[in-house]
Amino acid sequence: MPNRQYVTITHYKEREFYFLNHAIQTEDGFIAKEMEQFHESEKEKFIERIRLLQSQYPHTQIASISLATNQTVTDKEDKNKVSAKIFNNNFVVQDKMDIGNTPTTLYFSPFTILYQEYKHKLDNKLTLLIGYFDRKLYMMFATEDKIHQSWVIGTRGLSEKQIAIRVYKSMKAYYKISYKFADHIEMLLTDDSPKLLKVLREELSLTILPTQNSIHNLLHHMAGEQSRASSSYIRSSLSTGHTSIANDLHNDYSSQKSSGVSLHSDTKHNLENLKLNSSSTGDASSIRTDISFFDKLKLLFSNKESSGSSVRSTLLAFVPFLFVVGMGGYYTLEGKKELQSMEILESQIYAQTNNALLATTSKDVFLSMGKSAELKNALISNSKIKLKGIVWGIEPLRKSLTERYPNGKFTINPLENFMTEFSFKSKV
Amino acid sequence: MSLKSGGLVPKLLFIGSLLLLFVWVVPKMLDYYQNIKRYDNKKSELEESYRKYNVVNKAQKFNLEAFKTETESLFSDVSIEPQAEHQYAVTLQVEKNEIERINTFIESLSLHYLVKVKNSELNFEEKNQVIEVQFILEEL
């Protein structure tokens, strides 16, 4: 009689696809059927398929998972948020529940699933439990009596080695706040990623024995037993408009109870404390601690030691820069001064050389004229000479001048008073 | 603290520092020390001229009054007229048989004052048995 069977329908959304599965629960476990996949554009078809399964099997639970990253594990329940109890005084809390209008009666956190998988391995030593769901690392440090710290780290787009480094940094970050390293690591993979495991083993130098399972199987397991499901699903303590999932669950449980399924049939191996919506108020200080810790974690993953050290390294990097600029400025200014001094010196030397040459030319001209002529006017420079005067001995003067300035032009002009005027032009 | 672990700004500053060092600072340093060497050589050359003309004091910046006083002690008639900026028209008179004094004056002029004879040009004219020399002085 298939229609009397207890069936768990599981679904979750990863990126743009809905993944749907159902399993028939038996006393020896569940028998999962073939997984179905729907694109988000086929959402109506996806919902119709769930409704069809519900009609085929009257005793069903529809289980899904919260893959939100804003989940934290605290030791106090926050009435303003949605929460799920893990055990004792440990709760998973997230801001809101968004199931995207898909039929869901049980909604689980990866943290509760993780705890269910490994609770029997916990003891008084610190264990780091890692769940790899939808490319996110759900991590929590736990002992048998308490979950000490938790956080979620996205790894989409990262290589296996980068994921391993983030795990290692998380351990370091936890050490900074508690001065304890995890003695042991357990890892639950929902993706088959042997390379990630290999890299994690190499990077963390720890023996990690991973458990690989699909999200569907984990959900079938969580929803397979009423007491386990009821103590672990995420409940909303918000207004009635937001508690439809919890109400649905209770309705389902009521109907199941009437059909002979015992809600509290087996409590030995389950988390049975059902005082979930107690009147205890949220502890703001513990939440603040988490936020503060996340801030620290973000700083750690932002590849900077800290904002302070970043400022310090920037300031330190200015030292050689300023030194180089200072040196460059000094030599530029000194170079300019040196060039100015050099220009004055060179112009003085140039002037002195020209003056000496001019004096020499002048001496030569007067020596050439000697007593053969009497000067009337002359222009003497370093490039040319022009002479005019009275000549007493024409030939000696011509000879003397043309010997010194062979290309010169010597002319004579007899005057009325029986004297002779000469002129001489030449380039020097 | 290693550069590798530093942020973008320290890395950029470090690369900028290296670039500035090799593209700007080192060439400036080399230029500076080469200019110092050149300056020393030129200075030696000038000092040689001072020794040659027995000039003890180094050349001073041109001062009209000082120049006029000194020139009047050497020549009979001296006239100095300021012209354009930093230029002066100088007129000296000397006896015909003492023309050599003009040459001596000119050849060591730039060792006494930071001046030069414009275009290295002298104009001579005979006036009543004396030679009048005109030239233009230009400050360096």
Image (cartoon, rainbow, N blue to C red):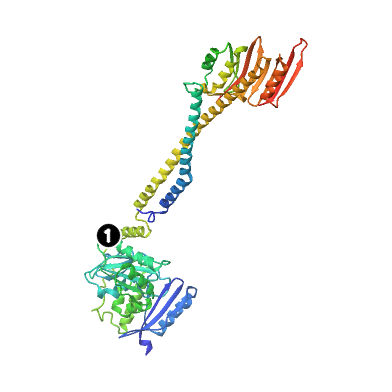
**Residue A368 in sight in this render:** yes
- Residue at screen point 42% across, 44% down: A324
Q: Chain of mark 1?
A: A
Q: Residue furthest bottom?
A: A1
Element carrying mark 1: helix
* Type of the residue with mark 1: Ile
Q: Which of A230 and A397 lies nearest the eye of the viewer?
A: A397
Q: Which of A335 and A269 lies nearest the eye of the viewer?
A: A335
- Residue at screen point 35% across, 86% down: A5
Q: Which of B137 and A233 lies nearest the eye of the viewer?
A: B137
**Residue A235 in sight in this render:** no
A67 over A226 or under it: above or below: above
B116 over A25 or under it: above or below: above
Task: Report whether A359 appears left or right of A166.
Answer: right
Rendered-image quadrant of the C terminus of chain B:
top right
Task: Report whether A349 appears left or right of A262.
Answer: right
Quarter of image, res A402: top right
Task: Report whether A214 appears left or right of A376.
Answer: left
